[in-house]
């Protein structure tokens, strides 16, 4: 059996012979990067759905500011639209939590793979919003919709002459509605207040998942870095003998001394696809204390403005 690095091209290309250990190492490096990319892609889907939920609510709050009221049809449309966003968020969160353990195994030795469930359990135990949103996901999947009441509160920001009228939009899940269905998790129902503001609960929920994700990134960081380095070394080595070109580079496993090659196995050697993982890491950084944050479209705070000059 022979192993080599070779450009897959019509013209005759240089061939670098490698041994079976390096072939296996490169194949393992590719698997590690595949697992790391899968983790980042699922987190990006979750985070994108969360952002869409926040933007949807801000959009309706702005509409209320301009029109004065959404009206009956407007409220019905808002409720349905935000319900859809919440379903998307809950579904993508389940996608992330269900698949993450098998993805992490690609990035580590299976027997020593990190136990993601323990991290999730810690967040579940310490955060009511996490427990509530998990129970709400099960309820939405099997019984009913998440939102039972929508409100558009307004308030003056101060008593000063330059005060501003602030408009918002809140969406609630109500305990009595969930209790009537008899499908909502009883233990969570008992600790639930009369109503839960779902956007605030969503922030805390996504914040908890962000904490878990950041720990996972740190856990696999060294393996992922070494995997990328191994592939980059192979690319650079081939470029050195092929006029700086490594487009279409593959690692091949084939029967010895046969021509044309009787290929048994092969896989691409490239990193462009892994660049998207690096970009996702930069784009979706950990957000600390997300449950304690909110967005305001007020013009500016004068005291803060004076301080920052």
Image (cartoon, rainbow, N blue to C red):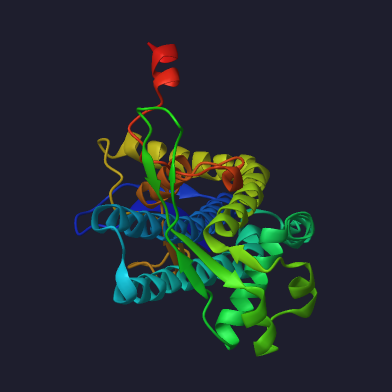
Residue at the image point whose x is 19% and y is 55% from the top:
11
Q: Position of residue 58 (x, y in %)?
A: 37, 54
Quarter of the rendering occupied by the C terminus = top left
Name the side, left or right, on which 62 lies relative to 204: left
Q: Residue furthest left?
A: 11
Q: Position of residue 293 (x, y in %)?
A: 54, 42
Residue at the image point whose x is 27% and y is 36% from the top:
244
Query: Image quadrant of residue 250?
Result: bottom left
- 89 in relation to 308, above or below: below
Residue at the image point whose x is 56% and y is 49% from the top:
22
Q: Position of residue 93 (x, y in %)?
A: 56, 65
Q: Name the one closer to the observer, 217 or 237.
A: 217
Name the side, left or right, on which 166 lies relative to 142: left
Q: Position of residue 178 (x, y in %)?
A: 65, 81
Name the side, left or right, on which 80 lies relative to 26: left
Query: Image quadrant of residue 136?
Result: bottom right
- 299 in relation to 73, above or below: above
Residue 206 can be seen, yes or no: yes
Q: Name the one closer to the observer, 297 or 145.
A: 297
Residue 255 can be seen, yes or no: no
- 6 in relation to 289, above or below: below
Residue at the image point whose x is 66% and y is 51% from the top:
212
Q: Name the one closer to the observer, 120 or 110.
A: 120
Q: How many marks?
A: 0
């Amino acid at each position: 059996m022979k192993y080599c690095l070779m450009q897959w091209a019509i013209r005759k290309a240089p061939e670098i012979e490698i041994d079976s250990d390096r072939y296996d190492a490169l194949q393992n490096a590719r698997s590690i990067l595949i697992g790391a990319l899968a983790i980042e892609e699922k987190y990006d889907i979750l985070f994108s759905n969360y952002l869409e939920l926040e933007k949807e609510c801000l959009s309706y709050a702005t509409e209320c500011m301009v029109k004065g009221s959404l009206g009956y049809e407007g409220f019905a449309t808002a409720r349905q639209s935000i319900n859809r966003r919440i379903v998307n968020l809950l579904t993508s969160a389940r996608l992330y939590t269900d698949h993450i353990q098998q993805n992490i195994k690609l990035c580590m030795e299976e027997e020593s793979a990190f136990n993601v469930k323990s991290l999730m359990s810690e967040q579940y135990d310490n955060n009511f919003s996490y427990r509530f949103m998990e129970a709400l996901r099960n309820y939405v999947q099997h019984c009913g919709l998440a939102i039972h009441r929508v409100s558009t509160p307004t308030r003056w920001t101060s008593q000063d002459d330059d005060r501003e009228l602030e408009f918002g939009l809140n969406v609630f899940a109500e305990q009595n509605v969930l209790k009537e269905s008899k499908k909502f998790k009883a233990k969570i129902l008992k600790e639930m207040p009369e109503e839960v503001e779902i956007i605030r609960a969503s922030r805390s929920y996504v914040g908890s998942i962000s904490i878990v994700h950041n720990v996972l990134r740190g856990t696999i960081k060294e393996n992922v870095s070494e995997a990328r380095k191994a592939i980059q070394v192979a690319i650079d080595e081939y470029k050195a003998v092929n006029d700086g070109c490594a487009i279409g580079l593959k690692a091949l496993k084939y029967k010895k001394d046969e021509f044309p090659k009787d290929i048994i196995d092969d896989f691409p050697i490239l990193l462009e696809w892994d660049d998207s993982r690096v970009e996702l890491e930069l784009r979706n950084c950990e957000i600390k204390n997300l449950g304690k944050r909110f967005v305001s479209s007020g013009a500016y705070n004068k005291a803060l403005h004076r301080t920052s000059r």
